Image: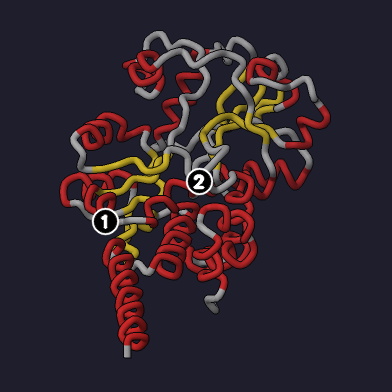
Amino acid sequence: MKALVTLIFAASAMFIGHSVVAENCGKIKVAEMNWPSAELMANVDKLILEKGFDCDVELVAGATTTTFASMNEKGQPDLASELWVNALRVPLKKALNEGRLHTINRGPITELGEGWWIPPHTVKKHPELKTVLDVLKRPELFPHPEDKSKGGFVTCPAGWGCQLTNANLYRAFEMKKKGWRLVDPGSSAGLDGSMAKAMQRGENWFGYYWSPTAMIGKFKMKKLSFGVPFAGSKNWDGCIVKPEQECANPKPSAWTKSEVHSVITDRFMKRGGAAITYLKNRVFPGSVMNAMLVYMSKNQASGQDAAIEFLQKQRDIWGSWISPKIAKKIESVKF
């Protein structure tokens, strides 16, 4: 009888303990942002939180500014896995200081950012081109499509914020005087097509892009150091990112550091338990993320499909984010 009572008590304790863990995580909403890397991250988080930590996860559609505003004002969704904070720095800092939101991971993806790129075959043939300053001395290597006597720098399509940035950096580095002209690709597809055409033909290409993206992953493009330091936020935020009429004297500068955070609400912070530790540990290597984006593009894979592919093929990476016990629990799931 005594042994039976002990057994019942132990079983009850295990049930209660499991319930506490589940309750600590509970129902959470995760923002599924509207670009591929964020779709992948949201779906990886969903699967690991559900299968490993018994959370009840709902994915909700999101975008940078709207998701932040909803989290800040309404406390929902609970998690933004990939929040690009450059455009939100002031209001995010206020929300963090006042305790409504918490940055749980300041670098969930490595090797990310915007900048100026050249192809790997150009680097191999011209190893002396290590910085933007080096490239600017050689406009003849990157002929403009409409005027071969000039170098062509492929900028952003009209309407993109980076069009202003590139135009002001073009002036700051006195590129016109050095024999360069801007190339407007016309659209996102035009920008991608310009890079792809150069890669297929083995031609040189010099222009703006960002990572993580399928294009950078597919072609293994080389991001250049600018060869000059970042010239300060006053120059960047007060001039470089503004229309030309508001930026009379742009100074040469490296691109501002791109920051991506994983941000959670205070409610989730207080009840997330071990799931919070997972989010703190969760870092995607940039090369792996780019490879996953190539997979998504090539196979027209959804975020969920890509997350399953990632969990099946990248055990060494995601296994390091969690305990062996939780990892085995996830491995036992038949996706």
Q: Residue 176 at x, y = what percent? A: 57, 14
Q: Residue 134 at x, y = what percent? A: 69, 16
The one nearer the camera, 315 or 87, is: 315
In the displayed image of the protein, which residue is found farthest to the left? 73
Name the disc covering residue 188, or none. 2
Marked residue nearer the N-terminal end (2 or 1): 2
In the displayed image of the protein, which residue is found farthest to the front? 2
The one nearer the camera, 146 or 194, is: 194
Residue 142 visible in the picture: yes
Name the front one of labels 2 and 1: 1
Q: Residue 119 at x, y = what percent? A: 71, 36
Q: Residue 100 at x, y = what percent? A: 20, 42
Q: Is residue 258 above or below residue 73?
A: above
Using residue 243 as the reference point, say whether residue 252 is left or right of it: right
Name the disc covering residue 271, or none. 1
- Callout 1: SS: helix
- Callout 2: SS: helix
Packing grade of label 2 (10 A; few <14, some 14-19, many >=20) is: few
Q: Residue at x 27, y 66 (%)?
A: 23
Q: Residue at x 55, y 40 (%)?
A: 110
In the displayed image of the protein, which residue is found farthest to the bottom? 1
Which image quadrant is residue 226 in? top right
